[in-house]
Structure formats: structure tokens, C-alpha cells
Amino acid sequence: MRGVVLALGGGGARALAHIGVLEALQQADIPIRGVVGTSVGAEVGAFHAAGVEIDEMKRLAFGMDWISTLRLFTPDFSEGALSSGKTIYKFLEPYLNGKKIEDLKIGYAAVAADLGNGSEVVIDRGSLVDAVRASMSFPGLMSPARMDGRMFVDGGLVNPVPFDVARNHFGGPVLAVATHAVPGREPLEESSSPEWQARLQELLQSSWLQRWPQIGEWLKGFRDPRNKAEVLKNMGLSSVLNRSQMISEDMLMQLRQRLMPPDIMLVPEVHDIGLLEFYRGKEAVEIGYQATQERMDSIVELAG
């Protein structure tokens, strides 16, 4: 059967590049037989599997600004995280709510991590919106998702780019897209654009934040000191935690790649886009599109 199975990785705002990948594949008339996603990759993959048009995905991505980004993670300090995830759930509902994974026209699965026993969990049945919410529960930023008496966190902790799950579930050929940050290839700080830094400084000085000093300390980790030596000397709490997770995720992906590599791995150059820089969606989508076009001859041959 002609087509490819997609494995879409996480990476926060970087993973918006998946929309560009989907657009390039659609223009080349390459069928997508199945999709497995982690974190934001699970979200983009779910939108596609649910029949959301590329233009609508781009409209949503391009419409994000720094205010919209902050609203997605409105602090309510629920269950060990900055945000309960209610705002993100409301964002997903119009597109995914009421849809069952087993009823989708193409195969779909989302990867999450079981907070209780540390295992990888592949969610391939049940509520689509709940599966996405579970897969993108970034530790510390969004509270764990509760499903069937279990608690789930971001799938990137166990499988940053789920190409092995894609092959096991839907066969091949597997086209994987890695958008997670890679140590040494990204800025030491998660977010470095002048706009983000200016808005972050405003937020840190806001009156309401003074009542929550622990949140201020967490947000300080997203500041961008002038040089790497200063970064290493003055890393904030979030920088240390996020960078440590980044190192683990990349090593885990490399180990999995040795055991069961994808047929093609795309690595869009989105490393300088910060974890929460969703307002750079247009840039991320274009990078994903170009990365796919550069490998299109190989992808067409792979698709059969």
C-alpha cells in the first residue's frame, strides 16, 4: 500500500514544524497511513488524523502571539505544576472533543509516560483529546493528566520521537520528524528572541507575580544572559530542569534509533526556537516545509 507512517516528536513550539511537513507531503500527494506522536507532535498528528485542514492548522499557529502563549499556561498551581492544563484543553476541544481514536480514518496513537511506574504508554483507543492532553503534560508546566486511575506526563520523557512505536503499530515505511532540542545545537537558554525577553521582563515585574515569588524564580530561567559563560554561571531553576530533560531525551532517542531506526529521519533546523516561543509558528512551519522539500525525492521513493 502506497504511503508513509509518520512519527512526530515533541519540542514545544519547535514541533509546529510538523505542520510544514504535513503541507509538503499533501502537496506531493503522499498518503499518510498512520501517525504516532509525542507531546506537541501528538497534538499536530491528532489534528491531521481528525481531518483538520492544513490551512486551519496554519491559521492557528500563525495567530499565536506572546500573550496567547502565556494564556495557554495560565497559572493556577494545580497538582504540582504551573498550570492545570484547562486552557489548553479548551483550545483542543473544538477540533478533537468527542472523537474516538478507533473511529479515525487513519491510524493514530499518542505516547505518554506513566508517572506511577515510569513506563511508556501508547494510547491508541478512547478519547482523542484526552490522549493528546496526556502526551503533552510537560512536567512542571502542566499538571499530569488523569486517565483510568493513572497519571500521565509528557511522552518525551520516554520516547521523544516515536518511530519504533510507529513501525510496531502501523508497519512501514516510517518517516520520522525530530524537533526536540539537541544539546549543543540550541541556545543554552530555551528562549532567546528579543521579543520574548522583553515580554518576559514585563511579566517578571508585574504586580500579581510579586505574590508568587516561586513562579518568578521559575520564569527567570527563560532569560537570556549575554554570553554562555554567564548562562552557565546563572542558570535558573527552569533552565537546569529543562536542559537536563533535553539531554536525557536526546540520548534516549539515539539509543532507540540504534535498535529500530526509521526509514527516513527529518531534522528541521528549529533549534533556536524556544520551548514556549509559539508566536514563532510561521517560522517553524516554513522550516518544516523546507526540510521536507529537501528530502522529497527520497520520500517519494519511500512512499512507493
Image (cartoon, rainbow, N blue to C red):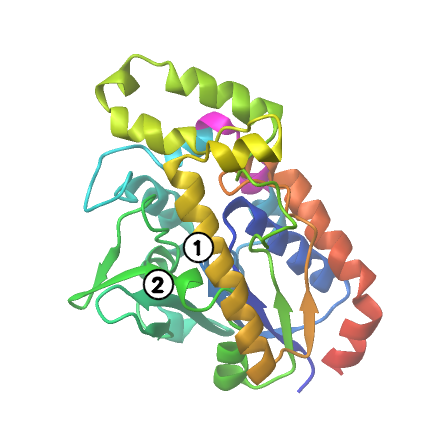
Q: Residues within 10 Å of mark 1 (few under 14, many from 20)?
A: some
**In the rendered view, does 194 fall on the left or right side of 106?**
right
Report the residue marked by disc 2.
131
Q: What span is colored magenta in the figure?
A: 59-67
Find residue 240 and report its horizontal and vertical position in percent: 42, 44
Q: Please identify the quarter of the rendering in which residue 4 is found.
A: bottom right
Find residue 86 and report its horizontal and vertical position in percent: 28, 43
Find residue 15 and report its horizontal and vertical position in percent: 56, 52
Residue name at image x 40 percent, y 62 percent: 157
Q: Which mark is residue 259?
A: none
Q: Assign the magenta stretch its main secondary structure.
A: helix
Q: How many discs appear?
A: 2
Q: Please identify the quarter of the rendering in which residue 207 is found.
A: top left
- Pointers 2 and 1 in contact (CB under 8 A)? no
What amino acid does circle 2 point to?
A: Ala
**Element at label 2:** helix
